[in-house]
Amino acid sequence: MPRQLVLYMSKEDEEAFLQYLRSEGGLVILPAISPSSNFAPVPALPEPAEDETTRKFWLHNNTVRLPLVTEYAPEKNSYVIDGFQSPVVELIRSWTISHMMLAGGIRADMNYLDNGKQDLVPKPVEFRDWFDSMQNWIRRRFKHLTLLTYVGPGAQTFREEGGLLH
């Protein structure tokens, strides 16, 4: 069962979150698609826009002992990361259009298919602990809106100044 949080994050909220992850060590940000099966780390996130390549990324902790699994996606003419099999957290970035902020979030699968056992097994404890630390950081610093939805301080200011969270 995947675990996820729906997040409204301003640019400042996102930077604070990524800074926290960098301070923990091992963070590598990977793009959603790549021309080769070797995904090059993203040095800085681009300005978010409608295009998925600016809004969807993978957060990878390179200290977790589980390989990245990639596959060729003909419909995208690119390689993609198999988030179910890989020790990655999907990051969908919030995006603001006019006076409306669209939600983003984080999501990760906690199990993967072990081909040797032909069974679902839990991802390494280091990965699960890493995801838990992300959730805990968000829960301590962001405002709880609904069951799985949190609003960062910058996004809360956006809302208080008349912006809509959608």
Image (cartoon, helix red, strand yellow):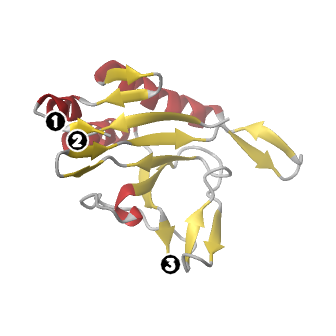
Q: Which residue is mark 3?
A: 35
On screen, residue 21 above or below 60? above
Counting residues from the start of the chain, the first of labels 2 and 3 encountered is 2
Judge from the rendering whether residue 144 lies leftward or rightward of residue 11; answer left or right: right
The answer to whether the residue labelled 1 contacts the one labelled 2, judged by CB atoms less than 8 Å apart, is yes
Query: Residue, x 34% and y 42% (percent of image)?
Result: 22
Image quadrant in which you'd find residue 74: bottom right
Name the element at disc 1.
Answer: helix
- Tell me the CA gap for discs 2 and 3: 30 Å
Which of the labelled discs sits on residue 10, or is there none?
Answer: 2
Query: Looking at the figure, which quarter contains the N terminus?
Result: top right
Residue depth check, mark 1 versus mark 3: number of the one nearer the observer: 1
Residue that badge 1 annotates: 158
Mark 3: amino acid: Pro
Position of residue 130 relative to residue 69, above or below, is above
SS at badge 2: loop
Question: For the residues marked 1 and 2, what is the alpha-carbon distance in whole angstroms?
Answer: 8 Å
Which residue type carries mark 1? Phe
User: How many discs appear?
Assistant: 3
Residue 15 located left or right of residue 50 = left
Q: Quick check: 118 left or right of 124?
A: right
User: What mark, if any, has residue 36 been given in the picture?
Assistant: none
The percent position of residue 19, horizontal first and vertical second, equals 28, 40
Query: How far is mark 1 from mark 3, CA to CA?
Result: 37 Å
Which x, y percent locates residue 81? 58, 61
Q: Tell me which amino acid carries mark 2.
A: Ser
1 or 3: tag closer to the N-terminus: 3
Q: Is residue 8 left or right of residue 39?
A: left
Q: Is residue 66 above or below residue 110?
A: below
Q: Which residue lies at the image location 49% right of the left edge and 68% below the top edge?
A: 33
Q: Position of residue 145 (x, y in %)?
A: 36, 23
